[in-house]
Amino acid sequence: MSVKFLNAREISVSCAGVLLMVGSVSGCGSPKPGGQTVAVVNGEPITQAQLNAEAGDTANTRDKTKRQTALNAALDAIVARKIVAQAAREQGLEKDPGLQLELDKIKDLALIRRFLELNAKTGISAVSDTDINNFLSQNPQLAEARKIIDVQKLEFATPSDPSLMEKIKVAKTMAELQQVLEANGVKVTPSQSKLDTASMSPQLYKAIMTTAGGEPLMLIEGLNAQAVLLTQALDAPLSNEKSIQLAKDSLQEERMTKRIAQQIQSLRGAAKIEYGPGYSAPVKPKF
């Protein structure tokens, strides 16, 4: 036998100009707390909307004291953030080209998150009892066969040299695999991990359990790879109620992930993408 493979998955105010401000403003002076302005930090207002967004669910309580405590904590977090951000602006860091690139990325990610929140659930069928029963029968690692396992891991960059991949395939133990990798100049990071099989796919669960005999399993995900070896497995079955809820959650997540992938594929198909000389879509390595 040889190494097994499994491929994974921010206001300028002028009396002569336009006044743009949320909250109470007296004349053309600095904004003051009141109305929708809950605080002002060095002349910069913090609005009720900003506070509500910061507090999130922590302020969702009928207990007025607990709610105000949560709001005050959230407000303090915003105040602290504003103070440091203002200091950064005073140092001229807003003009840093690298910062603008980072802000552009953050904006894109925020837009993507909102897009998915609004669109990911469309077209997804409800999870039925039959769906749950079938899912549990195909995924025993979520229920009666659930285990808490200890694994030995070797993490390294995915080799691009086909000849090295051939050498890796014939390694029969973690020691042999590590020796092959290091002998070919590949940096290896050994570690130990404790995993819950309830978070695994049935394919990964079965593959890892077969490493108990000493033959490592290699997982490749893009540029990162790791070899895994099971060292201990302890039974930790879940109750029927917890298993059903976990199965329902897993099915909903699975369907949403599939729906998101379909949407992304559709968007890419409709997009006009032009690459510069020497650039192209990534080519997946073949093993």
Image (cartoon, rainbow, N blue to C red):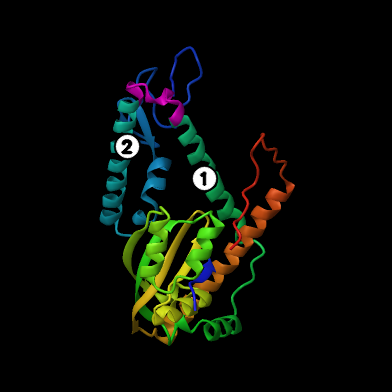
Q: Quadrant of residue 181?
A: bottom left
Whether residue 203 sits left or right of residue 59 in the image: it is right
Q: Magenta span covers which residues?
A: 89-98
Q: Name the residue that disc number 1 marks.
A: 109
Three-letter code, disc 1: Leu
Q: Residue 72: in sight, yes or no?
A: yes
Q: Give above or below for 257 relative to 283.
A: below
Which is more toward the observer, 95 or 159?
159
Q: Earlier in the sequence, mark 2 or mark 1?
A: 2
In the figure, residue 162 lies in which quadrant?
A: bottom right
Residue 71 percent across, percent down from the top left: 31, 48
The crowding category of the residue bearing disc 1, from other C-alpha atoms within 10 Å (few below 14, some 14 to 19, many at least 20), is few
Depth check, front residue: 213 or 161: 161
| Residue 220, horizontal then vertical, whole percent | 50, 62
Q: Residue furthest top?
A: 16
Q: Identify the residue under disc 2.
A: 81
Is 283 left or right of 183, judged from the image as shown?
Answer: right
Q: Main secondary structure of the magenta part?
A: helix
Q: Percent x, y for residue 62? A: 34, 60
Q: In the rendered view, does 157 fall on the left or right side of 253?
A: left
Q: Is residue 61 visible?
A: no
Residue at 45 percent of width and 70 percent of height: 171
Q: Residues within 10 Å of mark 2 (few under 14, many from 20)?
A: few
Q: Secondary structure at mark 2?
A: helix
| Residue pictured at 67% horizontal, 54% vertical | 265
Residue at the image position 43 percent from the left and 23 percent from the top: 95
Q: Is residue 109 above or below residue 10?
A: below
How far from the left and from the top, in percent, is residue 172?
43, 74
At mark 1, the secondary structure is: helix
Q: Amino acid at mark 2?
A: Arg
Whether residue 6 is in magenta: the answer is no
Looking at the picture, does residue 172 appear above or below residue 241? above
